[in-house]
Image: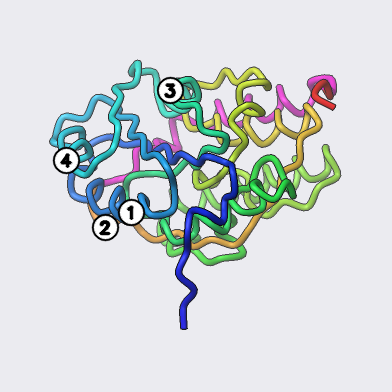
Amino acid sequence: MMKTFSQTEYGKSRVAVVILAKNEEKTIGKIINDTARFVHEVIVMDGHSRDETANCARSAGAMVYTDDGKGKGSAMRMSLKLTTADIIVFMDADGSHDPNDIPKLVLPVVRNKTDLCVGSRFSGGSDELSVNVGQLIRTFGNLSMNIAINKRWHVNLTDTLNGLRAIKRQAALSIGLREDIHTIEQEIVMKMLSHGYRVINVPTHEYARKFGRSHINIWKEWPRFVWCLIINLIHKERINHL
């Protein structure tokens, strides 16, 4: 029999999920409903959607904020100041992430086994590891960045770019995040390691989106990913929280 999850397993820790959304009216309501039982608070950061995403999110019971239009990274940084939760789970609104994975990400953080827990598509399975050229490039880029990060900080991470992750909010606020676009996902991992925080992976699954197209333009954004990687790899260690 499948174990029924209870938020009491989080102890005294308060958990919020931040869902990054832009033109996802077909999926946002279900995602909020499926997510709510795993967290205390559901926040939707709306990226100036042109459809009914924001209204659907409000109807489903989420707190909805409009981001500043600079990109996913900026929206994530904004969200850190819009809640007082101890732990934040970040996830996308396109249906690619499984809400049932949330406890797997949160519990290691609650139990103080890590400060950042990133879902690993390479361990848990992904419907998008290869299909077209763009996805193949993203997969190859992710693996290459994993190798560089692992060698630099002597860790053994299998996925550093997955948007599904749980992090201690105060830790996230302390590391000086700057990236405005999707590059924030690798920036978070590198800056957490640089500041002496612990980072682990747990297996999670990623599904192919059912509606619309990805908001990542890999051909346009890959130079920024490379630049973000290089800058953080060569930056001097900043262990300052211990």
- Mark 1 → mark 2, Cα distance in angstroms: 7 Å
Q: Which-is-in-front pick, marks 4 and 2?
A: 4
Circle 1 SS class: loop
Circle 3 SS class: loop
The residue labelled by disc 4 is: 59
| Residues at marks 1 and 2 touching, judged by CB atoms closer than 8 Å | yes
Q: Residue at x 70, y 46 (%)?
A: 146
Q: Main secondary structure of the magenta part?
A: helix
Please tell me which of labels 1 and 3 falls first in the chain.
3
Q: Residue at x 84, y 24 (%)?
A: 239
The residue labelled by disc 3 is: 82
Please tell me which of labels 1 and 2 falls first in the chain.
1
Give the amino acid at mark 3. Answer: Leu
Give the amino acid at mark 2. Answer: Lys
Please report the bounds of the magenta region as a residue range.
Answer: 213-238
Please tell me which of labels 4 and 1 falls first in the chain.
4
